[in-house]
Image: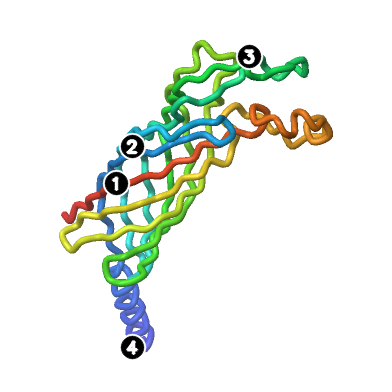
């Protein structure tokens, strides 16, 4: 009986010690987006992101960080094809227009932060982005309502809770939901080399800061 009580006590102490190492801190993050869209002859557009997160430190070298972020993306002077997908275009320039492209997403991410040295960390993780706005009302197609992306970057956290961070966010789904890697396009030299008929992906550089609250 005494041995069972002692074993239970040791297990309880071990459980408490493990859980004492786990720290949970909420925080906010905001910064600048430098966004563009691949295969649209587009320049980089400056905009912003803002959001919140919960930092769950599970070990001295690893932190799990769920995030919810409002992100304004798109591209500057993007070239968009007004002609649709019909194989009758002779000169794409006759059917295209150049204008700024605005896409707004509510991004749900799960970041994995790995400590490199004191203060310095690497971050990587996926996001699921839900479109909440765009300026495509006069375009032939509308962007689809969801995107997936992979995020990677580095950051430095100061002792008082402020973090400065640089990330790169690469979209994984064509913003119009198209997949041009099919038999028709791959066997047609014109469409294979036509920049307007290639998959268009969100690409974003994020430069910003975050602050963790220590309650």
Residue 49 disc label: 2
Find residue 101 and report its horizontal and vertical position in percent: 46, 24
Find residue 69 and report its horizontal and vertical position in percent: 36, 38
Q: CA distance from mark 4 to mark 1?
A: 57 Å
Mark 4, secondary structure of its residue: helix
Residue contact between numbered discs 3 and 1, judged by CB atoms under 8 Å: no
- From the viewer's perspective, is the residue at label 2 or at label 3 nearer? 3
Residue designated by label 4 = 2
Residue contact between numbered discs 2 and 4, judged by CB atoms under 8 Å: no
Residue 95 disc label: 3
Q: CA distance from mark 3 to mark 1?
A: 38 Å
Give neighbour class at mark 1: few <14, some 14-19, many 20+ (Cα, 10 Å).
some
Q: Quadrant of the N terminus?
A: bottom left
Mark 1, secondary structure of its residue: strand
Residue contact between numbered discs 2 and 3, judged by CB atoms under 8 Å: no
Give neighbour class at mark 2: few <14, some 14-19, many 20+ (Cα, 10 Å).
many
Mark 3 or mark 4, earlier in chain: 4
Mark 2 or mark 4, earlier in chain: 4
Identify the residue shown where x is 19% and y is 57%: 161
């Amino acid at each position: 009986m005494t041995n069972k009580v002692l074993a239970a006590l040791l297990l309880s102490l071990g459980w408490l010690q493990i859980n004492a190492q786990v720290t949970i801190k909420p925080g906010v993050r905001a910064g600048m987006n430098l966004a563009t869209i691949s295969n649209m002859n587009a320049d980089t557009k400056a905009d912003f992101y803002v959001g919140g997160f919960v930092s769950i430190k599970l070990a001295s070298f690893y932190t799990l960080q769920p995030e919810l972020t409002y992100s304004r993306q798109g591209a500057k002077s993007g070239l968009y094809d007004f002609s649709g997908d019909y194989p009758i275009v002779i000169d794409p320039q006759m059917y295209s227009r150049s204008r700024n492209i605005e896409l707004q997403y509510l991004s749900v991410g799960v970041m994995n932060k790995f400590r490199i040295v004191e203060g310095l960390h690497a971050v990587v993780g996926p996001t699921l982005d839900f479109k909440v706005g765009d300026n495509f009302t006069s375009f032939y197609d509308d962007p689809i309502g969801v995107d997936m992306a992979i995020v990677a970057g580095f950051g430095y956290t100061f002792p008082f809770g402020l973090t400065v961070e640089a990330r790169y966010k690469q979209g994984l789904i064509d913003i119009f939901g198209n997949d041009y890697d099919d038999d028709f396009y791959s066997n047609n030299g014109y469409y294979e080399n036509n920049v307007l008929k290639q998959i268009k992906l969100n690409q974003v550089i994020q430069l910003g800061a975050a602050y963790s609250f220590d309650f």
